[in-house]
Image (cartoon, rainbow, N blue to C red):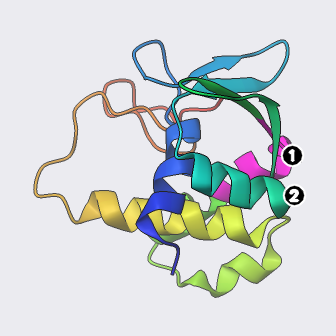
Amino acid sequence: MISKKVRELFVSLMEVSDDSPVSYDVETEQYCGCFNNVVVDKYIELGALELIEGGSGTTTILINNRDDFLSSFAAGAREANNGSDQSYADYNANPFAFSVGYEHFHQLAKKKRPVSGYICHGFENQDTGLIHQQ
């Protein structure tokens, strides 16, 4: 099970849209926002993230092996939606990202009402019926 703070960090990166508090630069593949620095530092040490610019306030980071992370996160959400268990994580390029996507899907499923217009990588946009891709 992934801690709430860790899940919040990585989900905030997957929820990037025009209205979100985290921004993403397509050209540099950098995410910029106010993150929990303790969690960011831990995942920098583990090699999942790379710090571009930090300090007080806004932090800019990269996801290492971003393509693998994105595909595995989306696969986790998809398998959770299909009713599969987390054993499919073993077959992904990034089992951690799979688990974050899987657990995030289940957290959203617990809500009594789906969030209208919710945007997250690998999740269906209820307004368009399309799977959102970063």
Q: Residue 107 carries which label?
A: none
5 or 29, which is in the foreground? Answer: 5
x 48%, y 38%: residue: 120
Q: Residue 64 carries which label?
A: 1
Q: Quadrant of the C terminus?
A: top right
Evaluate if marks 2 and 1 touch, with contact meaning CB atoms under 8 Å apart. yes
90 in relation to 17, above or below: below
Q: Point out residue 61 in the picture as x, y percentages from the top left corner.
A: 74, 33
Amino acid on which the number 2 mark rests in the picture = Gly
2 in relation to 29, above or below: below
Q: Main secondary structure of the magenta part?
A: helix
x 80%, y 37%: residue: 51
**Between marks 2 and 1, how big is the CA–CA gap?**
7 Å
Q: Say which of marks 2 and 1 sits in front.
A: 2
Amino acid on which the number 1 mark rests in the picture = Asn
- The answer to which of marks 2 and 1 sits earlier in the sequence is 2
For the record, the magenta segment spans 62-73
Visible residue check, residue 22 = yes
For disc 2, the marked residue is 47
35 drawn magenta: no
x 65%, y 20%: residue: 24
x 49%, y 32%: residue: 130
Secondary structure of the residue carrying numbered label 1: loop
Taking 105 as reference, is 32 left or right? right
Q: Point out residue 3 in the picture as x, y percentages from the top left corner.
A: 48, 71
121 or 50, which is in the foreground? Answer: 50
Q: Which residue appears farthest toward the left when viewing the image?
A: 112
Which quadrant of the structure image shows residue 89?
A: bottom right
Characterize the local packing of mark 1: few (<14), some (14-19) or many (20 or more) Cα atoms within 10 angstroms.
some
